Amino acid sequence: MKTVLTALALAGLGATAAQADCYSIYPEGSGQEPVPMVGYSVTEAADLDGLMDPPPLADGANAIACERDSIVPRPNDFELVRYHATPLLISKGEGENTQMLILGFQPAMENENGEMTEPTYRVQMAQGGLNDEERTGIIGALEGFAESEQALDAYMTAQAEQDS
């Protein structure tokens, strides 16, 4: 996936920024170019009440890349990566100044010793570095996901009770 991200950064996602802020991304080695998701915003979709709808990925795509003003994940980005199993690539800047962060989720699974691992969010810098403020913001966002997950669970439980 890192190769695709580097290609995105080098190709300049910004070239089509007027069309879209998010792009469907294909698996590494597929040879397919990112597809603009015109009119779609992960931020807007995740900020609606309840669990966001599955993203409208292009056929065969397995991730979403979004251009933002900050690479720090937003409070509800967890909905995309955890509940829709879609990695989120957040990019900021252009050319040599591009920063790119990959946010993903690893569900609980059995390890080689037969023990269950804890589910965890994963963050990787695919390009660029972090300053102290960004590092602190990323840690805070990841820690905040637990609170956001609880709020989503409470909302969904209340909705289910209303519907019964």
Image (tube, rainbow, N blue to C red):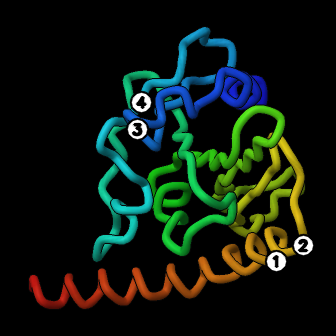
Q: Which residue is mark 4?
A: 36
Q: Secondary structure at mark 1?
A: helix
Counting residues from the start of the chain, the first of labels 4 and 1 encountered is 4
Q: Work out how far the residue at label 4 is from the one at label 3, CA to CA, in angstroms.
A: 6 Å
Dot 2: within a 10 Å radius of its alpha carbon, few (fewer than 14), some, or many (20 or more) residues? Answer: few
The reply to whether residue 113 is visible in this rendering is: yes
In which quadrant is the C terminus drawn? bottom left
Q: Which residue is mark 3?
A: 20
Which amino acid lies under the numbered mark 2 shown in the image of this protein?
Answer: Asp
Contact (Cβ within 8 Å) of mark 1 with mark 2: yes
Q: Position of residue 129 (x, y in %)?
A: 89, 52
The residue that appears at 82% across and 75% down in the rendered structure is 133
The residue that appears at 45% across and 52% down in the rendered structure is 84
Vertical placement of 138 versus 24: above or below?
Answer: below
The residue that appears at 60% across and 58% down in the rendered structure is 69
Counting residues from the start of the chain, the first of labels 4 and 3 encountered is 3
In front: label 3 or label 1: 3
In which quadrant is the N terminus drawn? top right
Contact (Cβ within 8 Å) of mark 4 with mark 1: no
Q: Work out how far the residue at label 4 is from the one at label 2, CA to CA, in angstroms.
A: 32 Å
Which amino acid lies under the numbered mark 3 shown in the image of this protein?
Answer: Ala
Counting residues from the start of the chain, the first of labels 4 and 2 encountered is 4
Vertical placement of 77 versus 68: above or below?
Answer: below
Q: Which residue is mark 1?
A: 136
Counting residues from the start of the chain, the first of labels 2 and 3 encountered is 3
Dot 1: within a 10 Å radius of its alpha carbon, few (fewer than 14), some, or many (20 or more) residues? Answer: few
Vertical placement of 78 versus 139: above or below?
Answer: above
The residue that appears at 49% across and 86% down in the rendered structure is 150
